[in-house]
Amino acid sequence: MVVKVLADKTTLGQAAAAQAATAIRRAIAEQGRARIVVATGTSQIDFLAALTQANAVDWQRVELFHLDEYIGLPITHPASFRKYLLDRLIRRTGMTDYHFLDGDRPDPLQVAQQIGRELNSAPIDVAFVGIGENGHLAFNDPPADFATEQPYLIVNLDEACRRQQVGEGWFRDLSEVPRQAISMSVRQILKAKEILAVVPEARKASAVKACLEGAITALAPASILRTHSNTSVYLDTGSASLLSEPWQFST
């Protein structure tokens, strides 16, 4: 694992986007297309904004999957991750090849299985992820399932996760936050050839410390990223503030 600490979330986003664009261009050059997994949420906004401005990325050759989606939330809702990706990545780049987790359909398990089959039809070149305030990876809240090989799961969201969504301004209060979601599984995320974790802001500092310096455990789900051979974690000074000195360096 490579940990990079930047001055602020803007420079963090720019640095992570440069590496992400390089990974996408490399995959296209080597195999004619790139298959990517994209995270959503407040923490990814600066990163995706920078990525959409990257030079020489042929977005028509990029196939997109997303990490997770709420169950029962229409695409028109401001917190919909499908809406988020349309607004912040797909429409800005002109992408045409994307697979949405439609959590508003009557049978979300069928959606999870269908998109899971499409996901597993070929390897994923690069996955962009975040780390939640409770240490979650995608919507795999603690204690996360580290064993299942299913590509997508129906998961129950814990209160800490749901409160984070209120705190970020996606919902007015806790009662509005869905209690379930479709989430990419932990083992599926680890199948990506390369993983970039984009984790700004001081509110993530405790989770970052637990996941990078504590035990690798289902109680700190993102700690599993340390077992992946090609993971880069991008932090700013706020999210890195509780790390011990050996981890802390700037680029």
Image: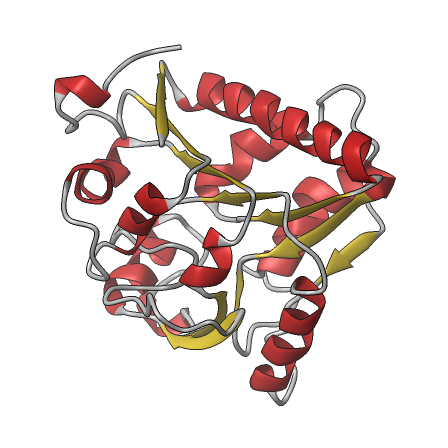
As drawn, 99 above or below 212: below
As drawn, 44 above or below 155: above
For the point 74% across and 28% down, the residue is 25
Report the number of numbered marks: 0
Q: How is the image coloured?
A: secondary structure
Q: Is residue 102 left or right of residue 56?
A: left
- Which quadrant of the figure has residue 108? bottom right
For the point 31% across and 64% down, the residue is 141
Q: Is residue 238 left or right of residue 74?
A: left
For the point 53% across and 49% down, the residue is 40
- Which quadrant of the figure has residue 237? top left
As drawn, 60 above or below 30: below
Whether residue 104 can be seen here: no
Across and down, in percent, residue 235 comes to 35, 27
- Quadrant containing the C terminus in the rendered view: top left
Identify which residue, 235 or 245, lies in the foreground.
Answer: 245
Q: Most extreme residue toward the top, as rendered?
A: 251
Across and down, in percent, residue 86 comes to 71, 50
Whether residue 79 can be seen here: yes
For the point 43% across and 61% down, the residue is 187
Across and down, in percent, residue 189 comes to 49, 55
Across and down, in percent, residue 179 comes to 38, 76
Identify which residue, 176 or 22, lies in the foreground.
Answer: 22
- Quadrant containing the N terminus in the rendered view: top left
